[in-house]
Amino acid sequence: MRVSPCKFLSALLLTGAAISASAEDGVTDSTILIGQTVGVTGTVAGPVKEMNEGAMAYIHQVNKQGGVHGRQIVMKVLDDKFDPALTLANAETLIKKDHVFALFQGRGTPHTQAIVPLLEQHNVPLLAPSTGAAVFHNPVNRLLFNIRAKYQDEVAKAIEHFTTIGIHRISLLHVDDAFGQDGLEGFQKAMEARKLKPVSITAYARVNPDYKATAAEVIKADPTALVIVSSAKNTAEVIKAIRAQGSQIQIMTMSNNSSQAFVNDLGPASSGVIVSQITPAPHLLSTPLGQEFARAVKESKATISYAAMEGFVNAKVLVEALRRAGPKPTRAGFVKALESMQRVDFGGLMVTYGANDHTGSEFVELTMIGKNGRFVR
């Protein structure tokens, strides 16, 4: 039977409309749109800048080589000023207005908690939230994929270190939010495991804390070592207040503060501060990851720091998942691709996922900031 040219054209248009309607949000023939809401300004601006520099250093390399299955990775970044309410508003914009394929590399525990219901409502995956809170590991959320190790593992590593060198009088200072509560839980578990009682546990406000009063309270308890669970700016200011009041307590803080901006903010007070890390050293050239990072940051002029290395690793996992998702990516396929990663070696950092395991990496080691302002392993 002969089909008229008009009917044939109409059929083609209808077919094209059906294909267009069935395409996944954020995906075109030439691009894939990834969204990020993060504190570009505010108390975590320094580490966020470095983390994003590291991620973009890798993404730029991938795009330069043709992208993933012929698509350029396009990042849409909104500033949430490290405010959970703004994080939620930004995520709604990215999902409902900008129609991003997935969310990537947010920051903050209460901030991530704020957007989880939105992810589930719109079936949008979130990869690499920069938080190690246990609540994002267990129970497993089918749409949320961690990469960094848990904060509680970092705290446990610190307690293990202190007790190994004979320090048993240990205090905790934590921010009074979900991040701090997670650190507190890990601290209590680690201390109980070694049959130790905390010298003191002090909470302080996330917004406009009184650094001098907080420092005085910590010093009064007279611990030998102090674990601080807090964001970069607040941690730096309270450490400076502790040192200004004459205390030489051994201080340890978390990997969320492992940026060069944090060290610079501390100034002379940085010397001797222990910082846990969740990636291999950024200057370590003995691994393929370190060599690849060095080449990428040299071209992009990114900061060489642990924060930048975290972003670089996160971007590598993102790209690997997009590759595994195939030439016609869907969100469901992206989730399945991530869950297919079993002990994938990214050049010195092992990442594992499964249907019942979205932890990613368990890498944790301790470093100390030297007198020259550099992290010493």
Image: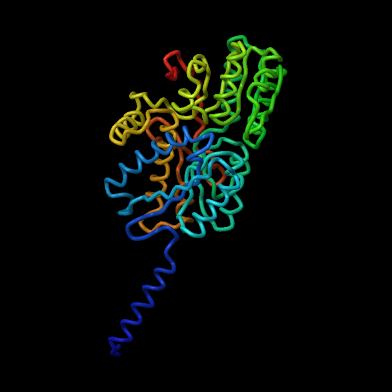
Confirm whether residue 371 shows in the render: yes
Viewer-side residue, 50 vs 340: 50
Which of the 4 image quarters holds residue 286?
A: top left
Q: Position of residue 159 (x, y in %)?
A: 61, 19
Q: Quadrant of the N terminus?
A: bottom left
Q: Is residue 235 left or right of residue 264?
A: right
Q: What's the colour scheme?
A: rainbow
Q: Quadrant of the C terminus?
A: top left
In the rendered structure, the answer to whether residue 23 lies left or right of residue 168 reads: left
Mark yes or no: residue 339 visible. Answer: no
Picture residue at 52% right of the left edge, 16% below the top? 269
- So how many labels did they put on this image? 0
- Residue 180 position within the rendered picture, expressed as x and y whole percent measured from the top left: 64, 32
Q: Residue at x 27, y 46 (%)?
A: 65
Q: Residue at x 45, y 29 (%)?
A: 279
In this rendering, is residue 54 above or below 340? above
The image shows residue 252, relative to residue 98, as above or below, that is: above
Residue at 42 percent across and 15 percent down: it is 372
The image quadrant of residue 299 is top left
Whole-percent x, y for residue 47 in the image: 47, 33
How far across and down, in percent of the image, does residue 312 sit?
A: 40, 36
Viewer-proximal residue, 132 or 343?
132
